[in-house]
Amino acid sequence: MGREKENRISVCIICGNEIRNIARCLESVKWADEIVVVDSFSTDGTYDVALKYTDKVIRQEWLGYIGQKKFASKQASCPWIFFVDADEEVSDGLRAEIEKTFAKPIPEGVNGFNCPRLVHYLGRWIRHGDWYPDMKLRLFRKAFGECGGEEPHDRITVEGRVRDFVNPLNHYTYDSISAQLRQIDRFSSISAETHSGHRAPSYFTICGHATFRFIRCYFFKRGFLDGIPGLIVAVNVAFSTFSKYAKLWERKTLENK
């Protein structure tokens, strides 16, 4: 693309058994100056597909969502890092927006960019509720940013100003309601373990937080405009919160017996 050296971008992707998604993801980032794929020893052909797009495919035992992304960022050689998940796709509009922005010097002190994420679920794009615009800081200057957060939810933080892109990252999330429920079960267990040092949540915490999440997602953020899929999203968002606190309560209660 002829970008100046200081504006070169490394796309970093962590993956494991993502054969259904990885080619679409990699096709959408072929414009990058470098593609780094960190594969947690996939057994479904993901590794071989990745090699068709970049020779920088590194196998690494799973270190957790945060640890794996920290490892990936260390493999990147460009000044800017763009984290894209294997089940995501850089839309044509977002690519054009990035190319236009990085074709000229980035203003001093601007060290990160948020991307809105648009989720495809149950046959439609979800444009309301907690899932949209779901701004994610994904593109950042390597020298001023790092990956942190709490498992299983990684989060990029940067020193300096952050600007927003308008066009979305397309997120091809769960293949079915069952797949979403499986992830809720897995993520809520990880979250309960991460917060195991906290005291057991109260009745109000367990019920109140889940109820608030449903009301916010379905009514305040107009999830009802997405039809039945919007209702399912709101209920499952609330159930995810309920599961996290219920499992933490279970863990703390059993510890005291």
Image (spheres, rainbow, N blue to C red):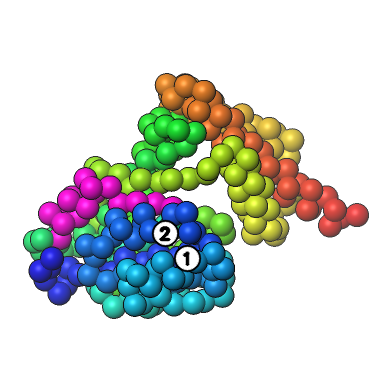
Q: Residue at horizontal 39%, vertical 52%?
A: 88
The residue type indicated by label 2 comes to: Ile
Asked if residue 161 is positioned above or below residue 145 in the image, the reply reads above
Q: Position of residue 229 (x, y in %)?
A: 50, 28
Mark 2 vs 1: CB contact within 8 A: yes
Q: Specify start and end residues of the magenta stretch as a single range.
A: 87-102
> Is 39 left, or right, of 88 in this rendering?
right
Q: CA distance from mark 2 to mark 1?
A: 7 Å
Mark 2 residue element: helix
Locate the N terminus by quadrant: bottom left
Mark 1 residue element: helix
| Location of mark 2 (residue) | 22
Asked if residue 90 is positioned above or below residue 75 in the image, the reply reads above
Tell me the tag on residue 64. none
Instruction: Please name whichever residue, 200 or 119, is drawn nearer the observer in this view of the structure.
Output: 119
The residue type indicated by label 1 comes to: Thr
> Is 87 left, or right, of 110 in this rendering?
right
Where is residue 180, by image quadrant? top right
